Amino acid sequence: MVRTLILLFITVFIQTALCAKEMAPLLTKEQIQYLHMKKTITICVDPKWRPYEWIDKQGKYKGMGADYFSLFTKNLPAEIVLHKTKNWAQTIKDIKEKKCDLLPMAGITKERKKFLNFTSPYYFAPYVVATTLDKSFIEDFSEKLDKKYAVIAHSAVIDDLNNRYGNIRFVTVDNIADGMKLVSQGKVFGFINTAQVISFFIQERGIENIKIDAKLPSGYHLAVATRKDELILRDIFERVIKSIDPQELAHIKSRWYGVVLETRKDYTLFYKIVGFLVLVLLALLYRALLLKRANLELEARVEQKTVALQKLNAELEEKVEQRTKALEHQAYYDALTNLPNRRLFKDRLHLALAKSKRSNSLVALYFIDLDMFKQINDSLGHHAGDKVLKIVAKRLSKIIRKEDTLARLGGDEFTLLVESAGSIAETVSIAQKMLELAKEPIEVEDHTLYISLSIGIALAPQDATNARDLLKNADAAMYKAKEEGRNNFQFYSPQMSKVAYEKIVLQSRLRQAIDNKEFDVYYQPQVDVVKHKIVGFEALVRWIDPKRGVIEPDEFIGVAQETGMIVEIDKMVQSMAIEQFAKWHKAALCKGRISINLASKELSSEDYLEGLIQQLDENSLKAEYLEIEITEGEIMRHPQEAIIKLQKIHDLGIRISIDDFGTGYSSLAYLKRFPIDKLKIDQSFVEDIPKDEDDCAIVKAVIALGENLGLSLVAEGVETKEQEQFLVEHGCRFIQGHLYAKAMSAQETEEFLRQF
């Protein structure tokens, strides 16, 4: 007896040691001790959520969740105990009342995080809508929010739908069967759950009048969830899940994609056997008939083979001819749009110009470029972009004459050659028709797209007499159309070449100015007109040219932004402004904030935030005295990235201001998500108030929007007392403009501060 007890003790000790050794790399010593002290882990599950999880007739935990949880707990030194419930609602109630420790497979929602701790999700299942067969396909679920849907009570679906579609109507049910019953009876438009749950139910019950109709953009992010007081237990499972080979998780998932329903008593096999025997008998009879016809068919085949051999030479000759034509077509035509390519277009352009010289006729060359086409490729992929190009090519082909040539040069660039163009009015008419055709919506892969064109027009012989120069001039005119705001056409003129040359000279001079540090910071005050108090300054860049003197930003900022040199200029401005403003703070000259403009290219750099923090530390200036200004148009280029970067800046205590608000076409949905503190009303809306009713309405709307979002407002470009009075009366007390002061040098600003 004593020997038996000793052996039993040694066995238990060795098993415990081996388990602890196996868990040692995975769990901490404290976590292992916690499990040994706890001894049992009580779980709650959804008893009727097939195939994810359920409790079978023998009271055992079954389903995909059971397989995952078995994998997670196979090496844990604790006993797993199942706490049985009648439905999911009771499961949620019991874990809140601490009758169980965790949920092995729970959907992550904002509401559940109030009483549960979640691990990282180990499975994702998108939501789908089950409807009756008589309903048309749901292309866009957001257009069906006026319908009523059934969902399971206390499920994650409810929280997700409320967060994403606040106005959706739904009816809660206790289980899947009740939800599907309401769909069949027409009492609800559809039942929302995952595809696996609904398809499993449809197969199991043999339902024929219900289909899966639409996929929603959200779904279940399934994870292990513990009670709030079981944080250690949550950390244990977090470590376990992250340690598991992804192939093991994928193996369980793939196994359950081919889930087999529970067998039931039926006569399917019997019917199959009988049917098979009948087919065998019919096959034997049919074979007998085939044997009788075999000789006749064999003779017919020999005759057919002879005829086929006779035709073979003719077919081969035809294929060779077709192949030759195909190769010629590939050499001169674009494979995607089937339009003439660059090579064929240039040949026809040379011929058209030669003909124009002989007949003294007008030749019009259109250079056509799709506006913002890169965004389509970046967001929807090149496959969608190719479809757009084919549709545009087809539309443009409809408006040209047979003798005209529409070609694709490459990418999103097209050219149109019109011989014997007639008059300038006719040339303009063709361009207007192309612009109108482009405005029609394009349907591509469940997306409705709207595009526009920028068109440059060069005429021969007045603009050029050779193909190279005419094409170059049309290209230059197209870029002029881009600069004029896109969605328009422009004629070539010699002045455009002069402008292009001046632009190149400015780029070179601007690079020298950056290297020579020929920039200074001017400061324009922002005033609280109610309290007659300076609340801050905006730092504005000025180019101090040795020959010309002070150069205003309007002359060089555009080129700096196009070339990327704006990043270097902004860095110089930021460094000088922070250093100067820190001195004014120490001298108690100004207690407000310094507002510094920021380009999106600088925001996206990896070391920007680190450099900003270093500058504040070196000058002993608190982050709360700094305000970053970024234009509405800049942040809307890549809104998702901007939200992340601006949030990091805002977390330091630096305020964020949106400059030129109202000119960048931002989405209000994004505006709510940006970590912003202030809106700056663009001076283009301020300059004509209170005389212009439209501008008055816009300014009022912006002020109301800022107040509703809890944002402060600054009006730019205020020059008259009438403008100031209008703004104050309608709730905007902070102004910036020549009414109080223009932008001033640091020395002038100091004198202004002492006299204000």
Image: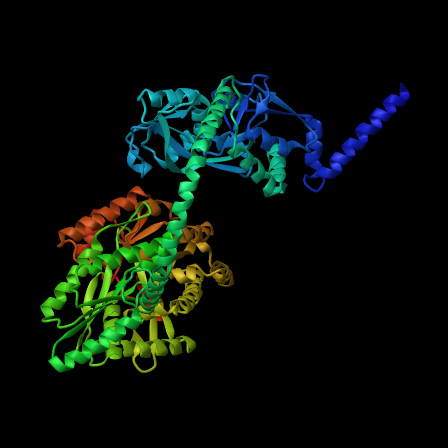
Q: Total marks drawn?
A: 0
What quarter of the picture does the N terminus occupy? top right
The residue depicted at 34 percent of the width and 56 percent of the height is 385
Q: Is residue 197 above or below residue 516?
A: above
Q: Is residue 327 above or below residue 57?
A: below
Q: Is residue 421 visible in this depiction of the protein? A: yes
What quarter of the picture does the C terminus occupy? bottom left
Residue 92: where, in percent of width, then height? 50, 23
Q: Is residue 522 visible in this depiction of the protein? A: no
- Colouring scheme applied when the structure was drawn: rainbow
Tell me if 122 is positioned left or right of 409 in this view: right
The residue nearer to you, when weighing 402 against 415, is 402
Q: Residue 175 is drawn in which quadrant? A: top left
Q: Is residue 704 above or below residue 578?
A: above
Q: Residue 527 is drawn in which quadrant? A: bottom left
The residue nearer to you, when weighing 627 against 350, is 350
Residue 335: where, in percent of width, then height? 33, 62
Tell me if 594 is positioned left or right of 67 in this view: left
The residue nearer to you, when weighing 371 against 382, is 382
Residue 40: where, in percent of width, then height? 66, 25
Residue 618: where, in percent of width, then height? 51, 63
Tell me if 98 is positioned left or right of 693 in this view: right
